[in-house]
Amino acid sequence: MRKTIVAGLLIGAFSVLSAGEFDAQANKDLKALKEYMEKKFATRKGAESYFPYTPKEELDKNFKWGLKGDDFRLGSYAYNKNGKEQYDEMNEMPPYEDNIDAGEELYKNTKFKNGKSFKDCFPDPAIKGEYPKFVKGKGVVTLADAINACLKENGEKPWDMAKGKMADLEAFFAHASKEKGKRYHIVINSKEAAAAYEDGKKIYYSQRGYLKLSCANCHVQGAGKRVRNEYLSPLYGQVTHFPVYRLAWEELGTLQRRIKGCEKNQGETTHKLDSKWMRDLIYFLTYMSNGLPVDGPDIRK
Ligand code: HEC
C-alpha cells in the first residue's frame, strides 16, 4: 500500500517536472527575442549599429525609442511615428466594427441544422489567446482549425480560412478576449508539442524561394528597416492583433491569409491554409507573442 503511494507520488512529481521542461527551449527563445527587440529599439544613441542604411533624419524624427514589452503589440506602429498617426486616425472610425457584430451574430444567434451552435463548441468566447493548441493525434490546432472542426462535427460545411465568416467569428473571439484583458497563453506540454514548435521555428528561419530570404531576415534582423514604403514589424508581438483589416485588402482577413501574402513576397510557392506547415508556423509565431495582450481585431496597411 505504502509503496504504491510513494510510486504514485514519484510519477506525479516526474510528470510535473517534465511538463515544465517541454517549453524550456521556447521560453528561452522568447526571452532572447524580447531582449533583442527591446535593445534594438532602446535609444537613438547607437541606433546606427542596428540600422546602418536608415537615413539619420528618419532615426531622429520618425522613430520612437524606449520600447518595452506590451508596446510591441502594435507591430511597426510601435516605433514608426508617422505610421502611428495615420493608424490612430483610422482607428477613430474602425472599419472592423461591423465584422465584430457579424461574428457575435454567428456566435449567439446562428443555429446549425442540428439545432446546436458555436456556443456548444466554445462555451466561452474569450479564447483567442489560447490558440493554437497542440492536440495529441491532431497536431497544432489554430482557432480557424477549431472553428472548422466544430462546423464539420455538426454536419456543416467548413469555411474558407482566409476571410468572410471565418474572419468575422475570429474578430468576435478576439474582441471578447481583449475586453476581458486576456493575454496570449500558448502551451507546450508534451514532446510532440515541442517538436511542432521546433518545426515552426525551422520554417521561420530557413531561407526559401528564389530570393533566398527567411521570415527572420525581414522580421527579426530586418525589424525596423524599410522595404520600399513599408516599415517591417518585429516578430515579437507580431500576431497579437489578428484578424486584421488591411487597407490593401479593403476587408478583414486572417493570419493565415497574411502569411500567404508574405510567402508570395518571399518568392515562394504558397502552402495551404490548413497545412501542417502553416499550423506549425503559427504555433511558433504565436508563442513568440506569449504574455502579450490580445489586441484584435485591428488595422494595418
Ligand atoms: C522580403 C521581406 C519579408 C519576408 C521575407 C517576410 N515578410 Fe512578412 N511582411 C513583410 C512586409 C513588408 C510586411 C508589412 C509591414 C509589416 O507589418 O511588417 C509584412 C507583414 C507581415 C505580417 C503582418 C504584421 C502585422 O502587423 O500585421 C506577418 C504576420 C508576417 N509578415 C509574417 C511573415 C512570415 C511568417 C514570413 C515567412 C513565411 C514573412 N512574413 C516573410 C515583409 C516580409
Image: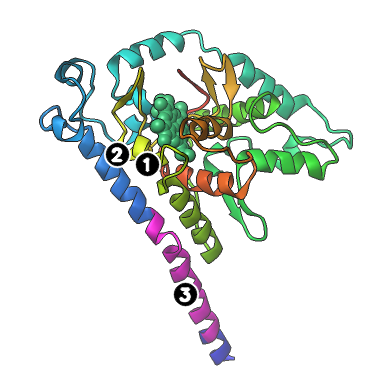
- Label 2, label 1: how many angstroms apart (C-alpha)? 6 Å
The residue tagged 2 is 221
What amino acid is found at the position of numbered circle 3 in the picture? Ala
CA gap between label 1 and label 3 equals 38 Å
**Type of amino acid at the residue the image marks with label 1:** Ala
Mark 1 — residue?
Answer: 216
Q: What is the CA distance from the residue labelled 2 to the residue labelled 3? A: 41 Å
Q: Is residue 150 depicted above or below 241 in this figure?
A: below
From the top left corner, tell me how far across and down residue 227 is, in percent: 34, 24
Nearer-N-terminus badge (2/3): 3
Q: Sequence-wise, which precedes: disc 2 or disc 1? A: 1
Asked if residue 27 shows in the view, the reply is yes
Instruction: Specify start and end residues of the magenta stretch as a single range.
Output: 7-26
- Quadrant the N terminus occupies: bottom right
In the image, 76 versus 204, the foreground residue is 204
Q: Where is residue 259 drawn, in percent x and y? A: 52, 34
Between 37 and 267, the residue placed more toward the observer is: 267
Mark 2 touches mark 1? (CB < 8 Å): yes
Rendered position, 42 above or below 26: above
Q: Quadrant of ligand 1?
A: top left
Residue at 35 percent across and 48 percent down: it is: 30
Look at the image and tell me whether residue 238 can be seen.
Answer: no
Are the residues at dot 1 and dot 3 in contact (C-beta closer than 8 Å)? no
